[in-house]
Amino acid sequence: MNAEINDYNQRQTQLDQEICNLLAVAIDKFLTDAESKIWHSHPVWFLEGNPIVGYSKQKPGIRLMFWSGADFEEEDLNVKGRKFKDASIFYTEVNQVDEAKLKRWLDKAKTIQWDYKNLIKKKGSLDRLK
């Protein structure tokens, strides 16, 4: 696990640490080609410089967000972004994380991507990469 991400996880409550650690280990396991780092104050994984998945602590719990998740057609990713193509799920307990679903979503994240890397250059216009 990336040292910065480990530090982020350690700053969470015990329960949230367990969720964050489980997510980080699973994402690292299933996205072996991804670069991970702290970006905008929370853990994010990138493929070819494009943000794919990340998580953050929010009031409802730990939010797992997929940048292109709105196009995954996954019922459980039901927190949709209003402006972009993101979709999320919140976790409040470690046993809520379904590793089989997480793997399926991460597989989709590899094949369904919008170009967030060049969003500023394109003045907010998103293009489909894959």
Image (cartoon, rainbow, N blue to C red):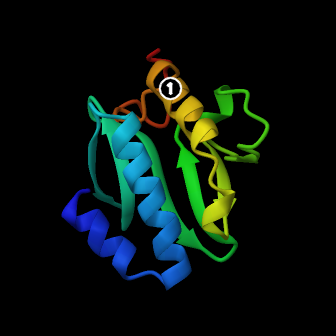
Residue 36 visible to an observer of this rendering: yes
The foreground one among 40 and 104 is 104
The three-letter amino acid code for the residue at tag 1 is Asp
Lateral position of residue 3 relative to residue 52, left or right: left
Horizontally, residue 124 falls left or right of residue 50, namely right
| Residue positioned most to the top | 130
The quadrant of the rendering that contains the N terminus is bottom left
125 in relation to 1, above or below: above
Q: Is residue 89 left or right of residue 125?
A: right
Residue toward you, 122 or 47: 47
Q: Determine which residue is flagged by label 1.
A: 107
Residue at 35%, 32% in the rendered image: 118
Circle 1 sits in a helix, a strand or a loop, which is it? helix
- Between 105 and 43, the one lying in front of the other is 105
Where does residue 80 sit, x and y in percent of width and height? 71, 45
Residue at x 37% of width, y 59% of height: 43
